[in-house]
Amino acid sequence: MSDASSSRLVYDTLLITSLDDVYKPATVPRVTGLGIGAALLAELMLSRHLIVWADKGVDLVYYDERFSPPQDSLALWLIEHVRTERNHLAVRDWLEFLAAADVYTKTAEHMVMVGLMVRREYKTRWRQRLEVSYEATDALIANAPFSKLRRYLSISDAQVPVEHTFLLALAETVGLSKPLYSQIPSGARRYADKRRQALPSPLRAVLAHLAASVADIAITGGR
C-alpha cells in the first residue's frame, strides 16, 4: 500500500485542530474528529472518488465507480465504507460516523507512518492505565498549516488552491476564527468570505454540515 504525499488536507486539519500552542488552542476532541472527517471527505471529492449529490434536499455521498480506488490506506478505508453501504448516507451521517470511528487516531497513525508525527505511550499516574498521545515530529511541521492560512489572509492572495481555501473555511467553522484573524488586516474576513463562496457547491455543503454538527456540540455540550 503506497503512502500519500506528506502534504495533505487531512493532515493539515489534524495539526490545526488537535495541537495547541501560544497562538492557538486545540478544539475539543469531538470537534477535532468532525473537522478531520470533513477534510477526508473533501480530499476524496477533490480526487473525484466521492460525489455529493443533493436528493430531495438531502446531501448524499456517492462513490464514483468510474475511477480506480485510491491506493492510500486512509482514503481507501473510507471509500470501502461508502462503497459497501447499502443505502446512500448523508454528509452529516458520514461526519458523525468518522468522528465516532476515531478518524483522529487513524489519521495520526498514518502521519506516524510518513514521519510527520510520533506516537508516545505512557501510564497515567493514579490508575496506571496505558495512554497514547501523538506529537508532531517538528515544531515547524506543527505550525506550518495555520501559519500558511494566516499568510494568505495577510496578503489577500488571489492564487489560493481550492484545498487551502477549504482549510481556511474549516478552521473558522470549528471555532478558530479569533486566533486566525488576530492582528490580520481588516479586509481579511471579506477576502475569506469571497474565497469561501467561490468553492464548488459540494465542498460548501460539507462545510455547512460541519458547521451544523459543531453548533450542536456547542448547544448540547457533546451529549
Image (cartoon, grey):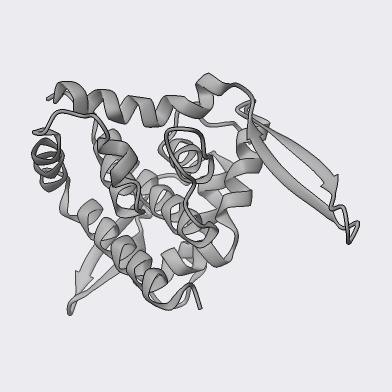
Residue 46 visible in this rendered orientation of the protein = no
Task: Report x, y in % for residue 113.
Answer: 67, 32
Q: Is residue 204 left or right of residue 67?
A: left
What quarter of the picture does the N terminus occupy?
top right
x 33%, y 61%: residue: 210
Q: List the single residue furthest toward the right.
A: 128
Identify the image quadrant of residue 149: top left
Left/right of residue 199 with respect to residue 2 in the rendered view: left
222 up-or-down from 30: above or below: below
Q: Measuring 62% from the left and 49% from the top, which residue is drawn there?
A: 106
Q: Nearer the viewer, residue 103 or 221?
A: 221
**Front one among 136 and 108:** 136
Rendered residue at 45%/55% (across/down) = 37
- Give the left or right position of residue 47, taking residue 121 as reference: left
Give the image quarter of residue 188.
Answer: top left
State the count of labels.
0
- The residue positioned 38% from the left and 47% from the top of the image is 44
Q: Quadrant of residue 217?
A: bottom left
Where is residue 14 shown, x and y percent of the image?
50, 42
Q: Is residue 62 or residue 188 the one in the foreground?
A: 188
- In depth, the one of 11 and 1 nearer the eye is 11
Q: Is residue 147 visible?
A: yes
Q: Position of residue 72 (x, y in %)?
A: 55, 39
Residue 144 rendering spot, x and y as whole percentages = 43, 24
Q: Is 4 rendered above or below residue 31?
A: above
Compared to residue 212, the image places residue 194 above or below, namely: above
